[in-house]
Amino acid sequence: MTQLESAQIGKITMEMEEVARKEGLSSEFIRTGVAEGKIVILHNNDRPGLRLCGIGEGLRTKVNANLGTSPDNPDLQNELEKLKVAVKHGADAVMDLSTGGHLDDIRKRILEESPVPVGSVPIYSAAVEIVKKGKKVVEMTADDMFDSIQKHVEYGMDFITVHCGVTLETIRRLRNQKRITDIVSRGGSFLAQWMLCHEEENPLYAQYDRLLRIARDYDVTLSLGDGLRPGCLADSTDRSQIQELIILGELAKRAKENGVQAMIEGPGHVPLNEIEANIMLEKKLCDGAPFYVLGPITTDVAPGYDHITSAIGGALAAKAGADFLCYVTPAEHLCLPTLEDVRQGVIASRIAAHVADLAKGSKTAQEWDKKMGKARKELDWDAQMELAMDPDLVKSRRDANPPDEEEACTMCGKFCAVKGLKEYFSEPLK
Amino acid sequence: MTQLESAQIGKITMEMEEVARKEGLSSEFIRTGVAEGKIVILHNNDRPGLRLCGIGEGLRTKVNANLGTSPDNPDLQNELEKLKVAVKHGADAVMDLSTGGHLDDIRKRILEESPVPVGSVPIYSAAVEIVKKGKKVVEMTADDMFDSIQKHVEYGMDFITVHCGVTLETIRRLRNQKRITDIVSRGGSFLAQWMLCHEEENPLYAQYDRLLRIARDYDVTLSLGDGLRPGCLADSTDRSQIQELIILGELAKRAKENGVQAMIEGPGHVPLNEIEANIMLEKKLCDGAPFYVLGPITTDVAPGYDHITSAIGGALAAKAGADFLCYVTPAEHLCLPTLEDVRQGVIASRIAAHVADLAKGSKTAQEWDKKMGKARKELDWDAQMELAMDPDLVKSRRDANPPDEEEACTMCGKFCAVKGLKEYFSEPLK
């Protein structure tokens, strides 16, 4: 029985208990959420208990880090290093998006070494395999796509992105829309190319039941990809994006009816004033399925700083109800991320998630911040380092800038506002 | 006649025309805003036309960068370099907050070299001077404070921060509140120490008319400082903060009645869910006076990344109506910023301001983003560099990561979503 099927008949699984414990919530809360399709538990039946992460309504906002080689950077070791950096800085899940080098090896090693759930996009390796054979991406068959999906879940993926909502209907609407950027999702683009070339429906949509059977066998969570996500602010929340979202809502419903957990992927490039409506729409059109957003990036003009444009969008999205933030690194739109980009991306995304959890009134989140406030008032630098999201960075910056007065810092030195006031005004800390 | 007095009798000044031209708005719009106290024009009568910046309702969101030495880092040259970096990356104004080295020299040089308006906090130099004489900060006299203010405006400051709202009444409320961080504003702390030591009212409040006369003589804008700004999330939007805001609203009204331009300074550390209410409150309690916010920082636990915690808060604040964002650098809470911190801080703050302008529907802002979207669709890398907020960074990252396929980047290489789709789906760009 899958997690969803167990939940629906009122059975609390070990996995639900584990998620409940991690979140400080009751197992019954988790069971209800899973049964209603509002919480998913990322895991793979073939690896029980190894990796586990709950995502959805009422839970802490989670963060995903994308890893993976590219044709220009096929080195596996580098990606394994990125995995370590991502996990060290607090990523709750990672995705292997490799398209360069020996994909089977890379997938195997990342799955072996990751202590957090791993996701992937099977259409990528289907594309890479066909190109390796000297053919074009559009020459893959529907069976090639499903074989790749089967392989990924057999290897142990906990969740897979499947762009089932790129249909003849959405492409017709896209044509009618006249967007600036058309399709910027890689998986969405592969499928659209295939459909336009063959003049046939998307196999992942046409044979969705086949997909559900594979996912059900391993209890893998489907991440219903948004192939039509906007690639610039001017394209956001347009008819093609919302058309796809409607279809994804129907597919999430069919997944739930078939005992398969599903979440929905979301934009993308979205102006700040449209973010809340985007989250509300997803929750309504997809019956409360967990929302997994990329960014959202809130301006197009800051390449090199898209971890910041996304932290702004991610914080507001998560406050409005987005459950899972896919990090965006400073390398976005420019190149494959470096180790340093991964660190920056994970931290920026965790800041967004935590800022949202604070705003949603999470007591655990608020307690953390309160401790930092007290450490600052007490000029307790050891506590400040310990409580910081990135203690190493705080330590290295303080070591590099030793103040003349130990209690202060080099910004104000002997003119420290906190220190100066203590002599004349002091209240016991709560 | 001051800008405000001219505006009130219906006269459009050269300065209003200049601001109107820069903003692409009518001179009459600017005049009305100035007359109503909803727009200020940062300048100093002694330097007509040299530096100019309009701030307030209906204008582009502006960004300030703080510079200045400290007792631990008294080097002037370094601060002049920071000025260059801040201006190069788009700061609309700077503040000299120096407290180390030869303050008169530093102030003079920064004013000489800055092409943008310069502000300062005169109470800092009053404190430094008294300490130089071997006395304590609290031993300064009211005349010392006003002499320092007089000196700063004579030197040519375009705006000055004055913490007039730290009164016996607000301190009584602070005592009653039992905050975690009490006072974290340096100027606010100096004045509170003075008041608590002498058991006397804040001279900047008690002799506010004297302050108005000095400001009026030079047509300098008063930046009414928030000495009670919260120093951690748990302290935000509390009775002492709002009490001070009420008083600042009364003082802004008195400034307007006396022909003096005024803006209001605001928090600080604020959870995301309280930001909009904070902006609304300022606009209501201060009759629409421009709001100049520091951050707001949206979590306490990410020292080293406070340019990001502030970009989140600043974007939401500016969208809700904040007019002027004071940058926060990655060095905040840790040390005096480096050149690199200044660059990061200015860019993060500009991103927040631009994201808000986009969300508020600015056509100029939207046009910029639309061009970037088109450049991306066309895989035009020269245009992408030119349109980027930080072209040098984009160029250096691309140069360091040359893709195998010229049109693509090293993230997807030959599997580029945009490039692949072009063969099968292509719409003429609008």
Image (cartoon, coloured by chain):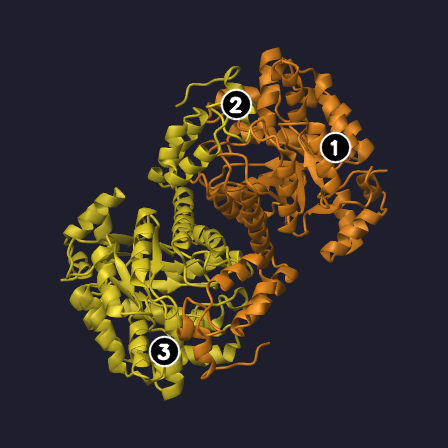
Chain colours: A yellow, B orange
Residue A57 higher or lower than A191, as above or below:
above
Q: Chain of mark 2?
A: B
- Element assignment for label 3: helix
Q: Residue at x 33, y 70 (%)?
A: A99
Q: CA distance from mark 2 to mark 3?
A: 62 Å
Q: Is residue B285 left or right of residue A55?
A: right
Say whether residue A289 is visible: no
Label 2 belongs to which residue? B174
Residue type, numbered disc 2: Leu
Q: CA distance from mark 1 to mark 2?
A: 26 Å
Q: Chain of mark 1?
A: B
| Residue to which mark 1 is pinned | B255
At label 3, counting other C-alpha atoms closer than 10 Å, the crowd grade (few under 14, some 14-19, many 20 or more) is many
| Of pointers 1 and 2, the one earlier in the residue sequence | 2
> Percent from the top left, x then y, of residue B297?
50, 40
To which residue does mark 3 refer? A191
Whether the residues at callouts 1 and 2 have beta carbons within 8 Å, the answer is: no
- Quadrant where the N terminus of chain A sits is bottom left
Mark toward the viewer: 2 or 3:
3
Foreground residue, B265 or A74? A74
- Give the quadrant of residue A254: bottom left
